[in-house]
Image: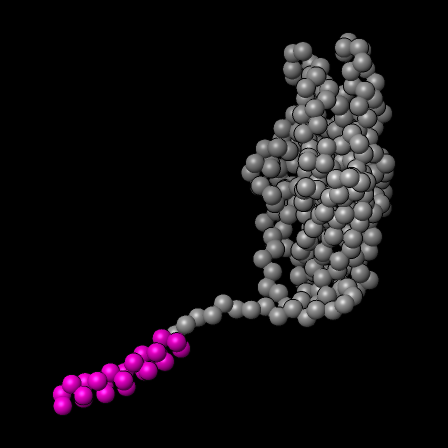
Amino acid sequence: MSNKRNLSISFLILPLLWFIFSCDKIEPPFTTINETINNPDTVDTTSGAIRKVLLEDFTGHKCGYCPQAATIAQQLIAINGERLVVMSLHVGETFATPETPSGAPFGSFLEDFRTTVGDEIEAFYNVDDQGLPKGMVNRRDPSGDLVPDPIEQYDNCVLPRADWEAAVQAVIDLPADIDISITNTYDTASRIVSASVETEFLNNLSGTYNVAVYLTEDSIISWQKDQTANPQYIEDYVQRHVLRGSLNGTWGELVDPAPVVNTLYTKSYNLMLDNTWDENHCSIVAFVYETTSKEVVQVEEAHVK
C-alpha cells in the first residue's frame, strides 16, 4: 500500500517539476526584419556599431619626412585598432611625380601613385605640397567650427603630423551616429571587384550626407626618400594604405535626400583593378560625410579578398 502511494506522489511531482523548469528556460531574443523588394530596407535593430575615424595622410615618395608621418599613422593604428582607417594620398608636383631625384640611383622613383581623386582633394583643401607631410582627421576642423570660414575655407582641416594623435582622440570615443557595412566579391578572371555598401543612420542628423567609396592598396614595395635614413633613398620601402582611386567619384553621392533612422540604404559599385595592383592587398574604404562641413561621420574598410 505504501509503495502504491509513493508511486502516485511521484506521478504528481514529475509533471510539476517539468513545468517549473520549462518555464525557467530563457530563449534568445529574435530581431524582426521587415524585408522589402526594393531598397531602402527598414530594420528593427539594436546596433552594436562603434565610431571609426578616417586619417588621410598627404604624402609623396620623394618627401623625406613623410616616412615619419607614416610611422605615426601606424602607431595610431596599433593604439586604436580597426577603429582607425588610414589612407595615404600621394599628391603634388614636388614630391609625388615619377622621376629620379638628383643623387638617387638611375631609374628609381618611377612609380606613379598620384590619382585624380587625390589631386582634387589636395586642391580643394589647399594642401601645400611643399609642406608635406600633412593630414586630415575626419576632414574636421579641430576648432569645432561646423561651417568653414568663408576666407579660410577648409584650410584648418589640414594638420601637421604632430597634431594627428590629439585629433583622433578627440572624436574616436564618441558614440556612432551611422553604421556602414561593406560586402565585397572579387572575380579573378575579370579582376572586377563588386562592392555593396550599406549605410544605416542610428540617430536623426541635421544636414545632407554623401557616401564616398575609395580603393586603397597596402604593402607596396617601392622607392622612398627618408631624410633620417642613411642612405636616404630606400629601395624596398613599404608604402602603406595607398589611395588608388574611387568607385563613385571624388565626392561620392547622396545617401538619401531624407534618411530615416534604422533604415538600410544599399548602393553597389564595380571597379576593374589595374593589372599592377595586388588584389590580396587591396581594400574598399567607404565613408559618410556631411556635405556642408565635409566632416566625416563614419568610415568602414573591408578587404577586396
Between 56 and 237, the one nearer to me in the picture = 237
Do we see residue 55 in this rendering?
A: no
Segment colored magenta: 1-23
Q: Quadrant of residue 109?
A: top right
Q: In terms of secondary structure, what is the magenta stretch mainly?
A: helix
Taking the view exactly as shown, the residue that stands out farthest to the bottom is 1
Relative height, residue 67 to residue 82 (above, below): above
Taking the view exactly as shown, the residue that stands out farthest to the left is 2
Tell whether 47 sits left or right of 180: left
Q: Residue at x 75, y 39 (%)?
A: 188
Between 303 and 300, the one nearer to me in the picture = 303
Q: Residue at x 72, y 47 (%)?
A: 185
Q: Is residue 231 magenta?
A: no
Do we see residue 276 in this rendering?
A: yes
Q: Is residue 21 magenta?
A: yes
Q: Percent from the top left, x then y, of residue 213?
A: 77, 46
Tell whether 162 sits left or right of 195: left
Q: Quadrant of residue 263?
A: bottom right
